Structures are given as structure tokens and as C-alpha cells.
Amino acid sequence: MGIKQLAFKAMHLAKVHSPEIMIGASIITGAAALYFTVRGTMKLEEILDDHKDRTDNVKAELAELKESGDQEEVAVYKKELMRETVNTAGKIALAYAPAAGLAAASCVLSISAHGIMKKRVATTLAALESTSAAFEAYRQRVKDRYGEEAEREILTGKHKETVMVETTDKKGNSKMVEQKVDAVDGLVSQYARYFDCKNDMFYCTQNNDGSGRVYNEEFLKTQEEVFDLLLRSQGYVFLNQVYEKLGFESTPEGQLVGWKLNSSTGDGYVKFNMTKIVEGDNENDDVWLLDFNVDGVIFDKI
């Protein structure tokens, strides 16, 4: 790679990482400003002592002249006293000038870095919103042509699979028979989650009497209602709030997307779109697919 290419690459990297560079420079200039503030303060005592010595002599002369009544000389010494005060103020300002300049530079660098990051976040949110809108428009076209249920199956990859299961007849004889079960190809979207025994909120039972199956399903339905009520009372709900309550880990995008009341692009309610994709012989093996009907990015709309 030639020198010219290296220079362009360095310029590009500097532009990409300009906020981090600015913040680093801001910290360095801030520390330098503190150093020069201390240094200026150390000079301050010397400046003030010198000012006191000079002005004390002028004040003594001025007092004698006032007693003698020589007004012209009094005016001259008053000007001299003023000149000494101005000179001292200039020396103090000069002593603190480096600190003030560096502090101002630190503030400018911090504000500039914030401005760049704010623009980048706005651009990212706009891109994500545009992608979400295009995907929702595509889903709507599929619904219009094939129906909502067919669209849902296409989206989830839901299909029937044939599996062999062991059954026992009335005489106690065991045999393997074919059985069709529901299955999905994978997660519906990056926001969807599987709710199963790996989740801390999943209720496992040793009885296998159906109580755990009922409890887990009712738990999910109750949380769906709770967050729908929260949406109506608070006006918005972030996806991470739902994740945390259901025992899932928070995600960076979960702090950006969610539900907003009276959203022009959303359904206007919270729905988990629960689908039981596995109903095992043991209820602890049950698996629900949760595909949350988020409105999209709401971070900048609250």
C-alpha cells in the first residue's frame, strides 16, 4: 500500500473515530487546564504582593497630596493607582489565560463529539425505521394476497413434521407410530424469543400433571395484559422491559424499539404472539415461541 493510500486510510479512520478522538483530547486538555490553573494560582500570591507594595506607596503619596491640597498631583496619583490596578488585573488574566483557553477547548471538543454522535444515532434510527417500515409493508402485501394465517406461517416457517413416538396399547404392548407435530424453522425476527425450561421464569414441575403447562401459559398471558395496561397508562413500553420481566437478557436494540400509544405504524396494543411449538410428553419440555408485535423504534418519539 502506497503512502497516498495510507494517508487516505488514516483520514478515513480519523473521521470514523472522531468522537472518541475528541473525547480523548477533551480529557487531556481538561487535565492540562487543571495543571495551568494550579500553576496560575501559585503565581497569584506573588502578583498580589507586588501589587500591594506598589499601591501602598502610591496611596501614601496620595494621602500626603490630599493634605497639601495639590489637586493636580492628586489627579496624577489617582491615575497611577488606577494604572497599577489595571496592570495587576492584566497579570492575573495572563497567569490564568492558558488554563482558560484549554478549558474552553475541552468544552468545545466535548460538545463537538456529542454533536457527531447525536447525528450518527439519528441516522442509524432513521435507517432502522426505514428497514422496519419496508418489512412491515412486505408483510402486509403477503397478508393481502394469501391471508393472515398463511403470512404468519410463512413468517415463522411453521410446518408439520413427522416424528416417531412410542405408544402403548390397551394390552400393554409398545410400538412406534408416526405422528405429525408443529415445528418452526427458526426465530421469526431478531426480537422473537423461545420460552422454555432454560428460562429462569419457566415453571418446572415434578408431577407432570399439566399444572406447569397451565401455569406457564397463564403467566405469559398475564404478562401480556400487564404490559398492555402499562402501555395505556404510561404511553410507551420498551422491549427490554418485557425481556427483563420474562427472564430474557436485555439487548441494545431492546432499548430503542418497543410500543408507543397512538403510534401511526403500530397495532396500538402489546401482543406476544405466543405459539406453542413443542408440547412434550413431559410438560417441562414445552416450548413457546414469542414474537413481539413491536411498533418499531420509539426511542426518539417519546
Image: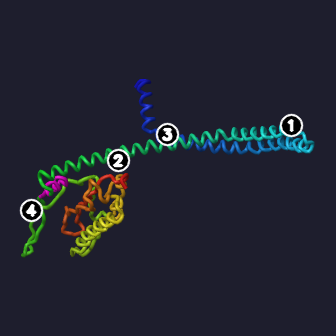
Q: Are marks 3 and 2 in contact (CB under 8 Å)?
A: no
Pointer 1 or 2: first along the chain: 1
Q: Which residue is mark 2?
A: 125
Pointer 4 or 2: first along the chain: 2
**In the displayed structure, does residue 159 sit left or right of residue 234?**
left
Q: Which residue is mark 4?
A: 178
The spot of residue 91 in percent (x, y) is: 73, 38
Q: Which residue is mark 1?
A: 72
Pointer 4 or 3: first along the chain: 3
Pointer 3 or 2: first along the chain: 3
Q: What is the distance, in whole Å, between disc 3 and disc 2 at their CAs? A: 23 Å
Q: Report the magenta residues as a range.
A: 149-161
Q: Three-letter amino acid code at disc 3?
A: Ile
The residue closer to the viewer here, 70 or 115, is 70
Q: Is residue 9 above or below residue 123?
A: above
Task: Give the main secondary structure of the magenta stretch.
Answer: helix
Q: Which residue is mark 3?
A: 21
Pointer 1 or 4: first along the chain: 1
Residue pictured at 14% horizontal, 52% vertical: 144
Closest to the camera, between mark 1 and mark 4, is 1
Whether residue 145 is visible here, answered yes or no, is yes
Q: Three-letter amino acid code at disc 4?
A: Glu
Q: Are marks 4 and 2 in contact (CB under 8 Å)?
A: no
Residue pictured at 10% horizontal, 71% vertical: 168
